[in-house]
Image (tube, rainbow, N blue to C red):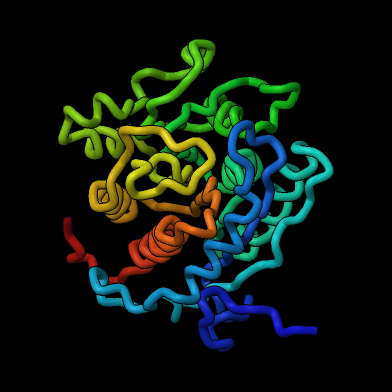
Amino acid sequence: MSKKKNYAGIPDEFATLENSKVVLIPVPYDGTSTWQKGADKGPEAFLEASENMELYDIETDSEVYKKGIYLSDPVLEKSSPEAMVDEVHRVTKDYILRNKFVTLFGGEHSISIGSIRAFNETFDDLTVLQIDAHADLRKEYEGSTCNHACAVYEASKNTNLIQVGIRSMDAVEKLPMDMEKVFFAHEMAQDEYWGDSAIELMTENVFITIDLDAFDPSLMPSTGTPEPGGLFWYETLDFLKSVFREKNVVGFDIVELCPNPNEKSSDFLAAKLYYKMLSYKFNSKPELED
């Protein structure tokens, strides 16, 4: 039996559950996506790219892997969308209750129903920051409330949901949408202060869910539903850096990498984004500025 791999090939001393502040849960699920299939291959491509990434972060002058990053067994439940969500919820909550900083990598966006549910049950007055091209606010879709198109419907009812980067939705999604807390891409393009405005709407505890199609497809072509007019790398990092600095980010997930064997830059962007977010979370230098 081959030895289990560590996240990013880090030394064993930083990869055990006991020694790790961070837990990474892969969820290779793609049961409800409706256009390009392949998000179930996302975690594998992300982990492979991570192994080829430098582990020193220049901006924060840190090596965050030394905080310990434990690569959990993947959540493989796929008998139904509901069963998958229940299992993601169970596993996520178990690690939260062990006092770990819990992160997940999907899979399609329906996995976030389970992760958000777990964080909402364990942290008071939770803000969910959704960075995404799509509203994902349908109550149900194709007969299931656990479809990727319903990823944050429950969060819109039970948490302080803030949506950033939205540029594609159905008219029915306007009903559950709180327009005061939505930052549409076409408006963000005209408003240099959108990030400050979004942070002002957040409570202290924040869970971040990032659908990689939030990024412009010129940067992130390998996703299930690439939408033109998306976010760029440094504006996204500037915003995330501010959120991590000003709020208590309690965990995050990243979803919807749909890898293309002929296009590795998307896999690498996902790997780099994950590591950047950890670097911002655990950077001990309060002078880190925009």
Task: Where is residue 85? Give x, y as percent.
Answer: 71, 42
Q: Nearer the viewer, residue 282 or 167?
A: 167
Outermost residue to the right: 79
> Is 213 above or below relative to 238?
above
Q: Residue 27 versus residue 194: which sits nearer the camera? A: 27
The image position of residue 5, as x and y in percent, is: 63, 78
Q: Determine the image quadrant of residue 278.
A: bottom left
Is residue 153 left or right of 130 when viewed as pictured? right
The answer to whether residue 227 shows anywhere in this view is yes
Q: Is residue 188 above or below residue 12?
A: above
Look at the image and tell me whether residue 117 can be seen.
Answer: no
Q: Residue at x 37, y 18 (%)?
A: 179
Specify the quadrant of the image occupied by residue 137: top right
In this picture, residue 108 sits left or right of residue 31 = left
Q: Quadrant location of the C terminus?
A: bottom left
159 is higher (above) or lower (below) than 9 = above
Is 86 on the left-hand or right-hand side of 40?
A: right
Work out which quarter of the rendered image holds the N terminus and state it. bottom right
Query: How far from the left and from the top, in percent, is residue 52?
Result: 45, 76
Q: Position of residue 74 (x, y in %)?
A: 70, 61
Closest to the observer, 24 or 235: 235
Residue at 52% from the left image edge and 71% from the top image edge: 21
Identified at 17% across, 59% down, the residue is: 289
x 52%, y 32%: residue = 159
